[in-house]
Image (spheres, rainbow, N blue to C red):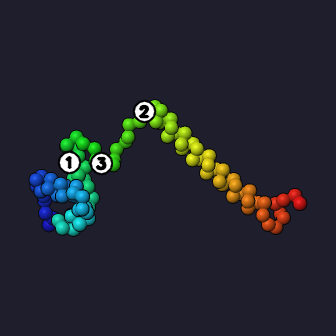
Amino acid sequence: MRKRYTKAEKLEIVKQSLEEDVRVIDLADRYGLGANTIYNWRSKYYKEQGIAPSGQGVKQMTDSEREIARLKNQLREAELERDILKKAINIFSKGDGRYTNS
């Protein structure tokens, strides 16, 4: 039978999981839990506290920041297409004469 943890025990485990040098997998082994259980408890803790976990969530961008991000993506795609075309030209211009008019 699995142990049922009180709210205070869950809170203590969550606080331990937030410490810098503590790995969730190690805590899970110590308490006989799955790592996902601890992550779920952390998620509930964040919601109750009204805070967003560090490094997560959607960044709010201004219109100009969104436009810059869109243009960067568009540039990245164009550069990728250019690189593919360069390789194709290089492949077809080499070799056995099947792909050239000479």
Q: Residue tagged by mark 1? A: 45
Q: Nearer the viewer, mark 1 or mark 3?
A: 3
Q: Position of residue 29 (x, y in %)?
A: 21, 68
Give the residue type at disc 2: Thr
**Location of residue 93 (image quadrant):** bottom right
Label 2 or label 1, whichever comes before in sequence order: 1
Q: Position of residue 102 (x, y in %)?
A: 89, 60
Label 1 or label 3, whichever comes before in sequence order: 1
80 left or right, relative to 92: left
77 left or right, relative to 36: right
Tell me the distance, in whole angstroms, between the alpha carbons under discs 1 and 3.
Answer: 13 Å
Residue found 38% across the figure and 40% down from its top: 59
Residue found 38% across the figure and 37% down from its top: 60
Q: Residue tagged by mark 3? A: 54
Of the numbered discs in the image, which one, if any, rests on residue 62? 2
Q: Position of residue 31 (x, y in %)?
A: 17, 65
**Helix, strand or loop at mark 1:** helix
**Location of residue 38 (image quadrant):** bottom left
Tell me the distance, in whole angstroms, between the alpha carbons under discs 2 and 3.
Answer: 21 Å
